[in-house]
Image: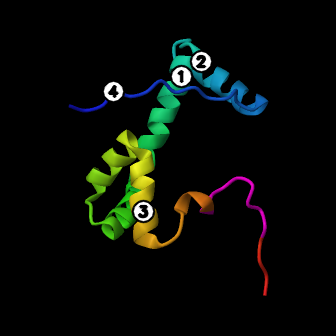
Amino acid sequence: MLEQPKRLHLRALAPYEDRLLSALSFFRTKRQKTTQAHHCLSMYLRQSESRILGEVEFYARMTGLDKYQLLELIYSDPDRAQKLIDDATGVSVADTFEQDSHNIETD
């Protein structure tokens, strides 16, 4: 049985983006901003599907899974997915994008 989506809580938008979202929802039959934000996120994800699945497929090949198996594992058990990827690559991919890592090494 497939797992149900978890509720998503996001930080407030920056003032400019909040105003853009307000305008977009205003012109879309005065939808509530939360409804419009949901539609915007859905649209972005669908438009980015090939880029996202390309990355998933890259790591899936390294772990011996197909891209949809890894996609489902990332959704249902992200810690296990991270361990599989870390073991397959020899590095922690999560550490690559750590927000505090702004040090750039130069030769």
Tell me which label, 2 or 3, sits earlier in the chain: 2
Q: Secondary structure at mark 1?
A: helix
User: Badge 1, how many Cα within 10 Å: few under 14, some, many 20+?
Assistant: some
Tell me which label, 1 or 3, sits earlier in the chain: 1
Indicate whether residue 9 is drawn in magenta: no
Q: Residue at x 43, y 46 (%)?
A: 78
Q: Are marks 1 and 3 in contact (CB under 8 Å)?
A: no
Cα distance between the residues tagged 2 and 3: 37 Å
User: Badge 3, how many Cα within 10 Å: few under 14, some, many 20+?
Assistant: many
**Picture coordinates of residue 90, whole percent (x, y):** 48, 73
User: Badge 2, how many Cα within 10 Å: few under 14, some, many 20+?
Assistant: some
Q: Nearer the viewer, residue 95 or 13?
A: 95
Q: Residue at x 78, y 67 (%)?
A: 103
Q: Please give the residue where the numbered disc 1 appears in the rendered image.
A: 36
* Relative side of 89 to 3, left or right: right
- Mark toward the viewer: 1 or 3: 3
Residue 30 seen in the figure: yes
Q: How many marks?
A: 4
The answer to which quarter of the image holds residue 46 is top left
Q: Nearer the viewer, residue 84 or 16?
A: 84
Cα distance between the residues tagged 4 and 2: 24 Å
Task: Name, please, the residue furthest toward the left.
Answer: 1
Q: Are marks 4 and 2 in contact (CB under 8 Å)?
A: no
Q: Secondary structure at mark 2?
A: helix
- Above or below, comparing residue 99 to residue 41 in the picture: below
- Mark toward the viewer: 3 or 4: 3
**Secondary structure of the magenta portion, mostly?**
loop
User: What residue span does the magenta drawing correspond to?
Assistant: 96-103
Q: Please give the residue where the numbered disc 4 appears in the rendered image.
A: 4
Q: Please give the residue where the numbered disc 2 appears in the rendered image.
A: 33
